[in-house]
Image (cartoon, helix red, strand yellow):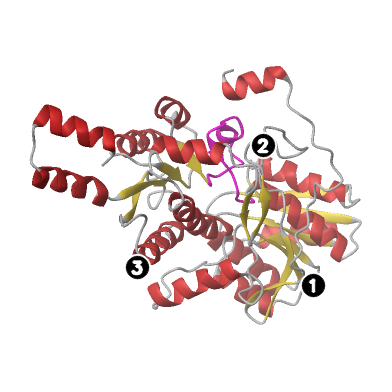
Amino acid sequence: MTLRSFLLFCTVAGGTLVGISVKAEAADTKPILLGFIIAQSGSPFAVTDPGRVAEIAAHAINDQGGIHGRKLVVEICDTKGQPAASLSCARRLADEGAITYIGGSSANGIAKIMKAKGIAAWFPMGSDPSDVRNPLSFITALNGAGAAQGTYLGALRFHAKSAVYVSMLGNVTYQTTALFGYKQAGVTDVKIVEVPPSTTDFSPYIAKIKEYHPDVWGGMLYPPEQQTLLVQAAAQQGITIPFVSSNNVIEDATIAALSTAPFPNSLALEKGEDAKQFPTWAEYERELAKYDPNHNVKGPTDGTTTTDWLAVWTFAQIARNLPEVTVASFSDYVSKDQNFETDALHPINFTAIAPVAGMPRQENIWAFAGHVQDGHEVVDNPTPFSAWQKTPITAWTPEQIKEATGK
């Protein structure tokens, strides 16, 4: 209770010190709410791992004393893949006092609620156009950038001159970004093979890859189970061409399949997936071991999953340094942060509103070179690289800024 509210209470209410103490205790112990809008069921793209690790992070934080003695609660609102439900979730969570939204995107009208309430989206989808143009979206996931990082790294590693990129049907964002990564590595002969959602028979697509005879192949299918089926099918049908991708979509079964596949692999790793080299990753693994002993999290290294764990974990570190944790205080803090740092990411300047070619306003354009071996992801170099290193950052035009910020 502030001094001003203390005096106001005594003067207006004439309350006793006991009454004041009760009110202060109630305010001080009210849980801090994070709103998580996600499709956990009812959609071909439904996933449950992100919600699980977000709750694991909150559990660990609470076991360490919470935030200023207050409990951290992640409230998951399942949209079942329905746009209208996303909007309803955003409204309800805002009304319930969510400090920020994690996961998801600003689409389906959510950006308007964020603007009206001043709520920030902490670590959202990022590659969605709704977040690209939303100054209240603070992006750290590789998302679409992972496509470029994967193709860039893989092309250089295997000295490729031609490639095939495997994509979800109609995923123009990832296709465009993957092509950018190949271009940065000097590869212009790139064919795209599109796979419809919920595909189970990959034979025609593997045949198409063989037909093109590329130097490298790979890509991203979602959800992670699709990526696993792709790798398994390629191995079963005798592909020996090097596989290149990133781990922004991957599950343990994918890692197992790549470990036994007859082809070498290259992965752009999103968050320093090596406990010996990165303390944040060591903390993540510690929490998984303690709070998920039955291994219900099937893809702990998947970029979407790790992003949502990191969203909760970093939120807590920031919130512990705020005098008061409110929607406004958190949003104001992160919007002014010019050097957001964690060992598992390249430092990010959240005040920058400058895009880069192939990924406008994608805040995280760095990754770690790595590969899969013996059932594990291996960080080859702890120094992050970027497919955008040769690309000058060009400031937005006044028109773009006005469109993005309304100013």
> Which circle's residue, 1 or 2, is located before the other in the chain?
1
The image shows residue 295 at horizontal and vertical percentages of 43, 75
Residue name at image x 21 percent, y 33 percent: 7
**Left or right side of 118 for 256:** right
The image shows residue 27 at horizontal and vertical percentages of 23, 45
> Which circle's residue, 3 or 1, is located before the other in the chain?
3
Identify the residue under disc 1: 240
For marks 3 and 2, give the one nearer the viewer: 3
> How many residues crowd mark 2 within 10 Å: few (<14), some (14–19), many (20+)?
many
Q: Amino acid at mark 2?
A: Arg
For the record, the magenta segment spans 123-142
- The label on residue 30 is none
Label 3 and label 2: CA atoms lie apart by 36 Å
Q: Amino acid at mark 1?
A: Thr
The image shows residue 59 at horizontal and vertical percentages of 36, 64
Identify the residue under disc 2: 361
